[in-house]
Amino acid sequence: MSMRKLLLFASLLLPCFGAAHAATYYACAATGNMDTANFWGTASTGNQTCSGSDVSASWPFAANGDVFDANGATVAVDVDPGAATGASAGVCGSVTVTVTLQSNATYTGGFTYATATNIVMHANVTGSKSVGLTITGSTGGGTICGNTQGGSVGGSSTYAVSDAHTSVTIYVIGSLTGGTANGGDGYYFSGGSGSLSVTGNATGAGTSAPGLMLTGAGTGTITGNCTGSATSSTGNVPGCWANSTGALTVIGNIINNLGQAGATGRILYKPAMGNYILYPADSSYTTGVINSHATLVRVPRNYGTAQ
């Protein structure tokens, strides 16, 4: 059989086996670490209880796409939930496993990260009934390689990430998206000092869920777009909001929506070549689409100088 026919035969045969399905694991006790033996089970049997915990007798066992549900527990992220080679601070490396960390839709609880751990986490983070991931500390640092999604279940603070770290830098490489719940911010940074560095886009959603919110004296930089909520014309739901003394530097496009700003507050805008600010020109405007229904403001190459 020729190599060409062999490859064709293989391409037809592979779908017969089907793709591997991601698994969901639930915390089985009130507290534990990510790598605690027998801490994760394949089914929830209630708040902080589960069945099938023998699957997690040893770590690591996660496969790409797996979901870890806090199930009402408080879970410390002490190891990389995913896997990669060549990762370092602010660098994701060659990624082989990305998982999702999520709070539960019924029970409170969530994941915690201490900056002294100082690791790269290859994980998406989702808030639900409570905060998905809470970050604290003043030494070390950390990197999140994954997207964040704010909560969609009722509550006033259902952030995907609530970050109160100081002094050091946290890196996020991925998109930050608000949820539909009130206060379901994609990323909420309240540190009194320190910095946050984001490479990715921030998008507001719902009626009170910015993609990225700064509320302390800590500073931030986002290399990506800030897009206001497309689902609400009331309230203040920008993609990026610096709501205190800490300034947010935006290097990217600012995309406004009907009734919602792309970025607001203490914003330092330092666009790169080709970046722009987009405004709705009429009620037929579609988010991010450059046409007759939008007003495009091109940024001069040498921003900050007379043109």
Image (cartoon, grey):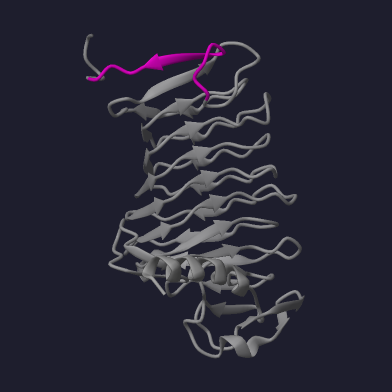
Residue found at the far front of this picture: 1
Instruction: Tell whether position 300 is magenta.
Output: yes
Residue at x-position 44% and y-position 67%: 5
Residue 97 visible: no
Give the side of residue 57 with respect to residue 145, left or right.
right
Q: Quadrant of residue 284?
A: top right
Give the side of residue 260 with respect to residue 123, left or right.
right
User: Is residue 110 placed above or below 231 in the rendered structure?
Assistant: below
Q: Quadrant of residue 52?
A: bottom right
* Residue 81 x %, y %: 47, 71
Residue at x-position 57% and y-position 13%: 293
Give the side of residue 52 with respect to residue 139, left or right.
right
Give the side of residue 299 with respect to residue 230, left or right.
left
User: Is residue 194 placed above or below 125 in the rendered structure?
Assistant: above
Front in this rendered view, residue 247 or 258 = 258
Q: Main secondary structure of the magenta part?
A: loop
Task: For the N terminus, give its image quadrant.
Answer: bottom left
For the record, the magenta segment spans 289-301
* Residue 262 x %, y %: 51, 27
Residue 95 visible: yes
Task: For the C terminus, give its image quadrant.
Answer: top left
* Residue 285 x %, y %: 60, 18
Instruction: Tell whether position 191 is magenta.
Output: no
* Residue 244 x %, y %: 46, 35
Q: Quadrant of residue 75?
A: bottom right
Residue at x-position 57% and y-position 36%: 204
